[in-house]
Amino acid sequence: MRQSDIIDMVNDLLDEQGEVSIGNLTFYPSQILRECDPVAYRITVNEYIDNMIEDFQYDLDRTDDEDERTDLQDQITELEDNYL
């Protein structure tokens, strides 16, 4: 999974409620967080990745299908190696 895909998923999650208007300007919540508090934005991205890993681990623990287990383990390893 590319980092840009993860960022897009996080932004979509943050922007679910739509744009924020300030005066006659409009912004997406993801844009506000990224620009005003980049540390909090990065924490949000990292928490999203942690949740993805937990979800994959949950599925891994509950499947007996070897192909699915391999795929899930590969996804977990990729996220841990590239993003944490």
Image: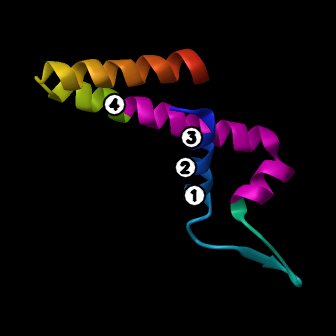
Discs 3, 4 touching: Cβ within 8 Å: no
Discs 1, 2 touching: Cβ within 8 Å: yes
Between the residue at mark 1 and the residue at mark 4, the CA separation in whole angstroms equals 20 Å
Residue 60 pos. (x, y %): 24, 25
Between the residue at mark 3 and the residue at mark 4, the CA separation in whole angstroms equals 15 Å
Q: Residue at x 84, y 51 (%)?
A: 35
Residue 5 shows in this picture: yes
Q: Quadrant of the C terminus?
A: top right
Which residue is denoted by mark 4 in the rendering? 56
> Crowding at label 1, few (<14), some or many (≥20) Cα neighbours within 10 Å?
some
- Depth order, front residue of 76/43: 76
> Crowding at label 2, few (<14), some or many (≥20) Cα neighbours within 10 Å?
some
Between the residue at mark 3 and the residue at mark 1, the CA separation in whole angstroms equals 10 Å
Discs 3, 2 touching: Cβ within 8 Å: yes
Highlighted magenta segment, given as a residue range:
30-54
Q: Earlier in the sequence, mark 3 or mark 4?
A: 3
Between the residue at mark 2 and the residue at mark 4, the CA separation in whole angstroms equals 16 Å
Between the residue at mark 3 and the residue at mark 2, the CA separation in whole angstroms equals 5 Å
Q: Which mark is residue 9?
A: 2
